[in-house]
Image (spheres, rainbow, N blue to C red):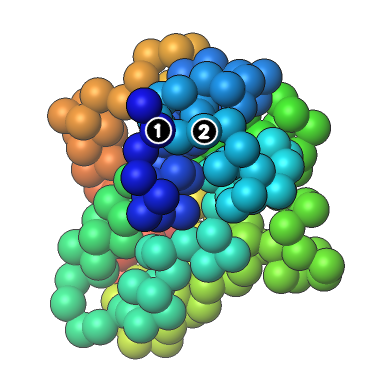
Amino acid sequence: MARPRNITDAQILDGARACFLEHGAGVSTTVIAERLGISHGVLFQRFGTKEQLLRAALQPPLEPPWMARARSGPDDRDARIQLLELGEEISAYLERIVPCLAVLRSAGMTVESMADRREDLPPVRARREVVAWFSRAIARGLLRPVSAEHAADLFLGALHFRPFHQHLSNQGFDRAESRAYLAFAIDAIHRTLAPGAERP
């Protein structure tokens, strides 16, 4: 029996996302509609085509939610604590979005199609915000004077590898292990960048 017409677009996208992640981009819209308890036609009334539904369900936002923290920081607290807070938000976001990106790529869709200009692409904007965060941390004396670009790449690289590896190796995301890795990575980065740190 079909669900009442008041099913929201967000509920449809949540159900479609679950189907795409479970079955891949090739899952039929009939399967998605059955899972949601709606008619097949409702999907097309709301989202036009399967490709539009796939994009709406899986495409990352133009501004990841963690960028607000990056843009507003750092404050005067210990840099290690702030790096850990920012790292936790970025890691949680990546764990959610990496499987979505893999399904989109398998369907021939890329992040590059999300913006007209390269500098507006989410990964480019994200790096720019993290570089700015490190620049401000260095200017405040929270970190030693190093290249903010190098520091940002070290930080982002440490955070990006693990979710991609876990997804590709089908290891999943063990929360305790992810927290332990993040603490280890931030400790290593902070020891390298702390004001009193010896140059490697």
Residue at image point 47% right, 62% down:
64
Asked which secondary structure carries label 1, the reply is loop
On the image, the x and y values in percent for residue 62 come to 59, 64
Q: CA distance from mark 2 to mark 1?
A: 6 Å
Residue 75 placement, left or right of 130: left
Residue 23 placement, left or right of 193: right
The foreground one among 35 and 178 is 35
Q: Would you say the residues marked 2 and 1 are in contact, meaning their CB atoms lie under 8 Å apart?
A: yes
On the image, the x and y values in percent for residue 157 come to 52, 44
Which amino acid type is marked by label 2? Ser
* Residue, disc 2: 39
Residue 193 placement, left or right of 75: right
Asked which secondary structure carries label 2, the reply is loop
Density class for disc 2 (Cα within 10 Å; few <14, some 14-19, many ≥20) is some
The foreground one among 17 and 162 is 17
* Residue, disc 1: 2
On the image, the x and y values in percent for residue 151 come to 50, 60
Which of the 4 image quadrants contains residue 80? bottom left
Density class for disc 1 (Cα within 10 Å; few <14, some 14-19, many ≥20) is few
Residue 133 visible in the current orientation: yes
Q: Residue furthest front?
A: 1
On the image, the x and y values in percent for residue 97 come to 48, 42
The foreground one among 150 and 4 is 4
Q: In which quadrant will I find the N terminus?
A: top left
Residue at image point 35% right, 45% down:
4
Above or below, comparing residue 141 to residue 151 in the picture: below
Residue 9 placement, left or right of 198: right
Above or below, comparing residue 115 to residue 192 in the picture: below
Mark closest to the chain's N terminus, 2 or 1 = 1
